[in-house]
């Protein structure tokens, strides 16, 4: 089989035109989000006092009733979210299984919705801001933007078939 026969035998993958910067951005940002959420989780379980250099409401936010759901710290959920995005992206990077891209992009929608809710709670209910929570909100928003780019590229690719 010649090279041209081989290339025509495999269907075009929606991920074929995905820029490498996008994959690396997903990896880096989800890793940073994982580190931030891990720090908040450790602080929760160890009773560590958070040092807030930008805002003064870290303790107020992280010890509020909204910081736990069914006794589980919200930060732990964030930690698992970021780890899932990170591992799925690394698995995609290794396997090039384009189905993972839609999964990753969908996850970023869920993460963004959760972050938007927690930012709302900080601003309008708790009336205090935690800088670490805002780092998480920023990483979540960036991942959401990357997810939208994936959806757009995926839709373009499947639309042109």
Image: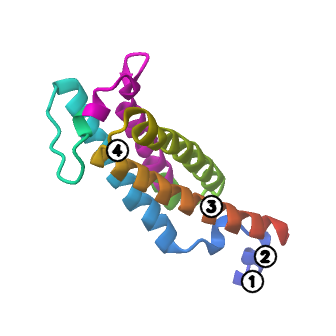
Residue 154 visible here: yes
Dot 3 falls on a residue whose secondary structure is helix
Viewer-closest of 120 and 40: 120
| Front of the two marks 1 and 4 | 4
Residue position marked by numbered label 1 in the rendering: 4
3D distance between C-alphas at marks 4 and 2: 48 Å
3D distance between C-alphas at marks 1 and 4: 51 Å
Q: Is residue 7 above or below residue 75?
A: below
| Front of the two marks 4 and 3 | 4
Left or right of 158 on screen, residue 31: left
Image: magenta residue range: 60-89
Circles 2 and 1, Cβ within 8 Å, touching? The answer is yes
Which mark sits nearer the N-terminus, 4 or 3? 4
Q: Is residue 115 magenta?
A: no
Viewer-closest of 53 and 99: 53
Residue position marked by numbered label 3 in the rendering: 148
Percent of width and height locating residue 123: 42, 42
Residue position marked by numbered label 2 in the rendering: 8
Q: Which mark is residue 133?
A: 4
| Front of the two marks 3 and 1 | 3
């Amino acid at each position: 089989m010649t090279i041209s026969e081989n290339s025509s035998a495999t269907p075009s993958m929606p991920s074929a035109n995905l820029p490498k910067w996008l994959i690396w951005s997903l990896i880096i940002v989800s890793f940073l989000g994982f580190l931030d959420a891990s720090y908040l989780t450790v602080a929760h379980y160890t009773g560590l006092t958070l040092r807030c250099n930008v805002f003064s409401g870290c303790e107020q936010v992280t010890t509020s009733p909204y910081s736990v759901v069914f006794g589980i710290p919200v930060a732990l959920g964030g930690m698992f979210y970021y780890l899932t995005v990170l591992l799925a992206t690394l698995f995609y990077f290794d396997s090039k299984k384009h189905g993972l891209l839609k999964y990753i992009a969908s996850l970023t929608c869920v993460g963004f919705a959760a972050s938007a809710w927690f930012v709302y709670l900080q601003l309008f209910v708790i009336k205090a801001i935690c800088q670490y929570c805002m780092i998480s909100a920023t990483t979540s928003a960036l991942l959401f933007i990357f997810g939208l780019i994936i959806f757009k590229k995926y839709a373009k690719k499947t639309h042109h078939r």
